[in-house]
Structure formats: C-alpha cells, structure tokens
Image (tube, rainbow, N blue to C red):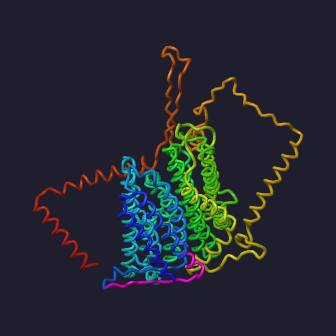
Amino acid sequence: MTITFFILLISFFGLGAFVSLFSWKNKELSNNLSNAFAFAGSMSGIILGGSILLKQEMATFSFVTSMPLFTLSLRFDMLAGFFIVLIGTIGLASSLFGIGYMRQFFDRYNVGVFGFFYNLFLLSLFLVVTASNAFYFLFVWELMSLTSLFLVLFEFFHSENIKSGILYFIMTHIGTICILAAFLLLYNSVHSFDFWTIKSLAATIPNGVKDTVFVLMLIGFGTKAGMIPLHIWLPKAHSASPSHVSALMSGVMIKMGIFMFFRLFLEILPIAPFWWGAVVLILGAVSSLLGVLYALSEHDMKRLLAYHSIENIGIILLGLGSSMIFLNLHLYTLALLAASAGLFHTFNHAVFKSLLFLGAGSVISETKTRNLEKYGGLIKSMPLTALFFLVGAIAISGLPPFNGFASEWVTFQSLFAGINSSVVSIRALFIFAGGCLALTGGLAAACFVKAFGITFLARPRSVESEKAKESSWWMLWPMGFLASLCLVIGFGAEASLQIIRHVLLGFGSFGTKIIPSSNGITINVQNGFAQVNMPIVFLSMIAITLFVYLLISWVSRRQKIVRDVTWDCGYTGLLPHMEITATAFSRSLILIFKGIFQPTSQNQIEYIDAKIRYFTRSHTVNLVTENVYEKYLYYPLNAFITRTTKQIKRIQGGNLNQYLLYIFIALIGLLIWVRYY
C-alpha cells in the first residue's frame, strides 16, 4: 500500500506539472488543472502518511544501480510519515486556495509555467522527507531549492522580487555547500552515503569529525530553516512569492531543515555532546525573541508574517535543544517531552502560519498592496477573512484553546524541567531560554493586535480598502479548513502528542514514555508536574465567558441604553488619517529595544505660510529601523570577500609559464599528501 500511494502521489504531481505547462495558452484551464492535480497529490500524501502513522510500520525501498553513489533509497518510517501528513495538509489547502488566487495574474504572467514549478516544488518536498541516501537527498534538496526559486521569481516585473530571488539563491546554495561538505566528511569516516549505515557506524566516527559535521549541518539546514543570523533571505523571499506559495515556504519548506535536525541530532547521531544542545537552545532563544521584535517593526503584511516564521523556528529549536541536553544527561523522559514539544510546534506552526499567509493573500488580492497603513475597516467587507485571520492570530499568539497554546505550553514545561536541574550552569541556560520564550509570547500577542486591528478595524485608509469585497469560496474554504484544524488540534492536544510520542520512540534514543493520566486526556510532565487538560481549559473558557455575560446582564438590567453620536470636540469631519497607524502602535516597543533596532526619526513639517511657524498644514514622522545583521555582519563580510578576491585575481597574469608553474606546485603538493597521509 505504501509504494502504491507513493507512486500515485508522484503521478499526480508529474501530471499536474506537464499538463499545466502544455495547456498554458488557456490560462483558466491550466490553472485549474495544475491545482487540481496538486490537490490530488496532496490528498494522496495525507493518506500515505496517515497509513504509516496508524500502522506504526516502517518500509524501505531501494533501487540499486551499477554505481553505488546513485542508489535510489527511500525510507517510509514514522518521522517521514509525520512530515508527509504535514506537507499534504498544507499542500491541499494551498492548492485549493490557488484556484481562486492565481486568477489575478492571468493578464500579466504565464500561470502554466507557474503550475509546472508549483507541482514539482510540492513533489520535491515529499521526496526530501523520504530520502535515505545522502547523494539522492542532495539531488531532491536541490530540486526543492530551484523550484521554489522560480516561484519566488514569478512576479518578475517587480525589480525587488528579482533581488529577493538572487539573495535566496545565494543563501540556499551556501547552505547546500555546507551540507555537502558534512556528508563528504561522514563518507570519509564510514565509506557510505546511506543514512542508516552512518547511524550504525556512528560510534566509529572521530569526535572532531562529528563536531565539524554538527557545525556544517547547523549552518546548512539552519539557513533553510531561517535561523538567526542566517535568516536574511526569508523575509524578502516570502514576501516576493504568491501568498499560497508563501504559505508552503513558511509552513513546510523551512521545516525541511527542522526535519533534518531531528533526523540527524536525535536519530543518526544521538547522545551528542552537551554543547551541541546548548548551542541549539541558545540559537532558538535568540531567534524566537529577535524574530518577533523585527516583526513588530514591519508594516509590510507578508514580511511581518515571515519574521514570525523565524520566531516560531526559534521556539521549535528550544524544544530540540532541550531534548539534546536531556539526552546527554540521560534524562530520557524529559528528552522525549522536549522533542515532542518541538515536533508538535512544527505541525502547529505549519497550520496557523499557512492560515495567516492565506488570509494575507485574501486581503492583498483585494487591496493590491501589502502595506498595513493602506488597510483598515476590512472586517465589514471581508468578515470571513477577518474571522479566519483572527483565529490564526490567536493561535500564533499562544492563547487557548487553539493549537499554538498547546505546543508552547509543552515547550514551557520542558524548559521548567531544565530549570529544576541541580547544576547551576544548566539552570541558568534554561532560565535564559524560558525568559526569552515568555517575552516572545507577549510581544507576539502585541504584534498581532497591531496586525489584526490596523488591517480589519477602524475605517478604510485607502480607496482600495473601501471598495474591497469578500474573496471567492475557493479562497475561503482552505482558510476555514485550517482555522478548524487550529481548534481541533488544540482541543485534542494529547491525542496529537500520543502520535508524536510513537514517532519519536522509533528513534531508539529515548528510554521511557510519557504516560497519560487515567482520569482524562492530560499532558503530563514528570510525575504530574504542571498538568493541563485542554478540554477542561476549553470548557472553562466557555463557562467564564457565559458567567461574565450573565453578570453584566444582571447588573445592567435596570439601566437604559441611549445611543447618540460620539462627542468629538465639535469636529464632525473624522478622517481615516486620524486613526492610529501601525508605526504609532509599535513605536513605544521599538524605542524600548532601541539598542537592537537603532531607530532614527525623520520629521517633515509643511507650513501654511513659511513666515509663520505656528500654523502647520501637515506634520509627518518617519520612524526608520536599522538592519543590524546586514550592517554589522553581511556588509563587512561582503567587503572582505571582495577585497580578498581582488587580491587573488592578481595570480591571473595571462602568462602561460606562470600557469605551468602553478600546476607543477599543485602536483608536488598532491604527491606529498598521498605519500604521507
């Protein structure tokens, strides 16, 4: 059954790619067929992954060629099944959304070419998580990178999109070079590219090689995941691509880096040195906090959401790093808990972030802008989009009863367990991580109060927002589906954790289990410490809301309500520009963290009469923040590389005798290497 559905999956995406390309002249037909086949392929993926998880079985398929390096090896284990379900779920929603969303591009771009790369991109995601051989893995990893690059470049008439694509191309291939170097080092030690051969011989790999592989893998897969400070491509690439592609890139593609972190650090190279886990934990804490801070300063809707992807990758890394530390300390129950938190948040983030990107796409398709300052009042004309976006905003803010709360709660409990450690240095590390996560949660809530309020409340601040209307059902149904998942997963959190527990127990690194309570579906942490029962939380919220409503109704039962015009100091012409702006909302928080943002303020005052300074026609304040990563890391690095290459360029003198001398020196060096090493 496994191989049957996998072949069916490949067939659907392959047909979707080529049918879309060959029917490009009929744009409506090409778009519909492309997304229909992508929908069918994603559904096949959900069935395939679901069957693996339910049966808790593992299947391996190898297609051996005469050249060992080119062996095609596939592995369908529990971890692969989990990510196959994740990819299929988001792919299904995005493909359905694309039927309505892509119609706005019919007059300007070739949607047939888009459909070709879109289907191949989805296919490559499924192939990455089933790869069992490093050589084959690198091939499908590159396929994923290149197809997503062409999707980022789809709206090529915008010069900024071209720049974003070039930056994405450079950063993703820097990461690929590091991954390739790591696999070559492993091959040099175990003489195999097969993941499970590497796992079986991991004990024979020298510690120095393991440490080097860890650093290279952290850079390579951390770049794809958008981990700070390797994140600079992510906000630009996600904002450049069509919104349902942004949902796939943020919800799924960056998780391929997380998938390999779990595969490598918890399964293939388990029981790592303590400092590995500490580095991952610190990077997770920094990424979560700085990601949400930069999101607060953004007024571009899609860039704001992209920075929140960095934040949530940091939260996932908090769970992974904690698990690595606990494994090193032989605390297997806590290691299983922390890894469960990371994997649970991986799925949850995919759901609510995809929902938010689809909601943003719905708004952008109507208003034709990503600028928050041009929105306002959209809740009246787009009520369903507003409702679904609100669900995503509550979920990403970590508030009950939605799924974001459940996974962040488990993450908190794993960090609290680390704080209980008797070792002072470990306790300080977990206190730092827990403090960053707590601050991140508060700032995320503030950021989405801004995002939802400025977008959907008050009055329209542009003609486009005033004339906006609700999106088509093709775009609303996927958002409704994902919004329902946010509630269902949050309500049934323990059922989800039980599945994740079985996924992780297949690694063999964990020695014990998390045992559910006998009196209900309860998340348990270390002998009942800090429990949360999600159904009880949900019912309690309903009861409290009902109680407050009845109390207010009883207190005000004898009061008369008089409706009248709000007093506005005698001024009757309230205008949209009198509303609070996104800049004003986030200004105080930016100034609190001015050491990070390094903000500069520019005042522009226009007077009615230049000779009289007391009567102004307009007063504009522009708050500009500094990109400290580019200023202090990437620009100096670029300048250094430029200077170095200019010096190296001098060896190209054009003299044949000089080139022969280089070859002679190289040959002598190689002979010495072969002789003594």
Asked where in the image residue 405 lies, by quadrant, the reply is bottom right
Asked where in the image residue 435 lies, by quadrant, the reply is bottom right
Visible residue check, residue 532: no
Residue under the image location 60 percent in, 61 percent down: 482
Q: Is residue 63 magenta?
A: yes
| Apparent side of residue 156 relative to residue 521 in the rendered image (left or right) | left
Q: Residue furthest top?
A: 611
**Quadrant in which the C terminus is drawn:** bottom left
Q: Residue furthest right?
A: 558
Asked where in the image residue 403 lies, by quadrant, the reply is bottom right
Q: Nearer the viewer, residue 13 or 205?
A: 13
Residue under the image location 38 percent in, 81 percent down: 192
| Apparent side of residue 445 relative to residue 637 in the rendered image (left or right) | right
Q: Position of residue 292 (x, y in %)?
A: 56, 51
Q: Is residue 260 magenta?
A: no
Q: How many dots with numbers?
A: 0
Q: Position of residue 558 (x, y in %)?
A: 89, 40
Q: Which residues are magenta?
A: 49-65
Q: Position of residue 162 (x, y in %)?
A: 36, 51
Residue under the image location 21 percent in, 76 percent down: 671
Residue under the image location 67 percent in, 56 percent down: 399
* Vertical position of residue 124 compared to residue 390: above or below: below
* Vertical position of residue 428 compared to residue 505: above or below: above
Q: Nearer the viewer, residue 183 or 351?
A: 351
* Vertical position of residue 10 compared to residue 646: above or below: below
